Image (tube, rainbow, N blue to C red):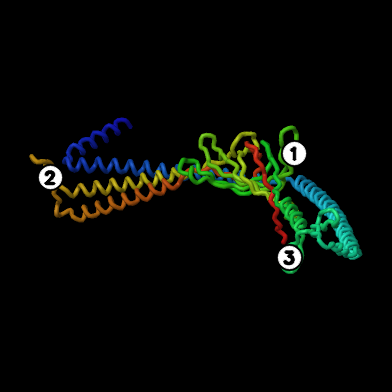
Amino acid sequence: MEKKKNVLMEKGKAWFDKLEPQQKRKVVIAIVAILIIVISVFGYYFSRSGKKVDSQKQEVAKQEEIKIDAGVLQKTQYAESQKQIRELQEQIKQMQEEKRRAEEEAKRKAEEEKAKKEKEEKEKALKAQMPATPPPPVPAGQTPVPAGQPGYPPAPPQEKVEVIGGIGMVSQQIQQKQQEQDKKEVKKKYYLPTSFMEATLLSGLDAPAVSKGDHNPMPALFRIKAPAVLPNQVKANLKGCFVIAEGLGNLADERAHLRLVSISCIDKKGNAVIDQKIKGFVVDNDGKIGLRGRVVSKMGSHIVRSLIAGFFGGLGQVAGTQAYTYNITGSGTVSTIDTGKLAQAAVGAGIQQAAQNIQKFYLELAQQTIPIVEIQATRTVTLVVSEGVELEIREYHFKD
């Protein structure tokens, strides 16, 4: 075998030595081109096979996650139904208590109105019974005594009456109504200190993991599922409120780091609303800041395609240069086209231009395809309020 190899190598070397310089150049270019094609094909094949293996693993993982114990599902449904029944019972109790309070308030107001009317009627009757006594006659040679002086009854105090639309309104009553209206306009505030609460991620998240996404963070929606835990074992009932957060991905720890933006709450009767900006961050169920996710990047296929486009561009350049003859003169290198190879020069220039356009397209596509950290929805996380804030409770009737 070794002798045969040596003989073949000697014959190939002898054949190569017999070739002219231009023919030797063509043979070397052809060998290099074949090697580049083989390397590109193998690289593209291995990149595609790696994706298939990843997709098979994901399908197997999904099939394993779908398996659920029927007994656990039944227990969960029973516990959820019991929980809903308890909540309904509490709502019924609250409605009954509110109805009783409303009836007592209406009864009290009716009694006050009745007592007020009786008092006004008594005052009117007393004024009607008092006789109008004229002032005593003034003797001759004396000046009349002005009102308020001794010997003349004092003038009764007069109330300032404002007439609006033909209805008499006492100024004192207007001031009382204005004070009551000012009291109603005073807004209630609730202070929320540094605290944490359990929540559910309602919307999935594809957080960009490069600096290009700094000016456009991705938003996410959370729903609070348990009362907030405040300092000194105090709890605040924020269950059911919505929280908006936004954030970016990080390739260093393969997590999406989110910052809290706002919180929104509405009471069960629809009479009050809270819509306030807050500051805080999100902690995953493993106790670390940020939500861990899967990094998705599609750069491998773009690199392989750019390599193939560059290879064809090189072939076009080689084919185009073969149609020219280069002469070295005193003023430099002069290239002249061979009239018999005009078609070869045109084909080479066309291939080279097309390859450059393909390379430009793949470059722009690679710039737009940035890596992301993929986060799935329905994940249970912890929201941490890092700075205390006053939540302003606004009165708003949604049911009207």
Residue on which disc 2 sits: 334
State the residue in front, 356 or 36.
Answer: 356
Query: Disc 3 and disc 1: Cα gap in Å?
Result: 54 Å
Left or right: residue 280 versus residue 322 is right
Q: Is residue 195 above or below residue 93?
A: above
- Determine the secondary structure under disc 3: strand
Where residue 197 sits, quadrant-wise, is: top right
Q: Residue shown at 81%/61% (left/top)?
A: 141
- Label 1: how many residues lie within 10 Å, few (<14), some (14-19) or many (20+)? some
Query: Disc 2 and disc 3: Cα gap in Å?
Result: 110 Å
Residue on which disc 3 sits: 163
Rendered location of residue 114, percent (x, y): 88, 60
State the residue in front, 232 or 14.
Answer: 232
Cβ atoms at labels 2 and 3 below 8 Å apart: no
Q: Amino acid at mark 2?
A: Val
Which residue appears farthest toward the front when viewing the image?
141
Rendered location of residue 372, percent (x, y): 51, 43
Mark 2 or 3: in front is: 3
Residue on which disc 1 sits: 235
Q: Amino acid at mark 1?
A: Lys
Rendered location of residue 30, percent (x, y): 27, 43
State which tag comes first along the sequence, 2 or 3. Answer: 3
State which tag comes first along the sequence, 3 or 1. Answer: 3
State which tag comes first along the sequence, 1 or 2. Answer: 1
- Determine the secondary structure under disc 2: strand
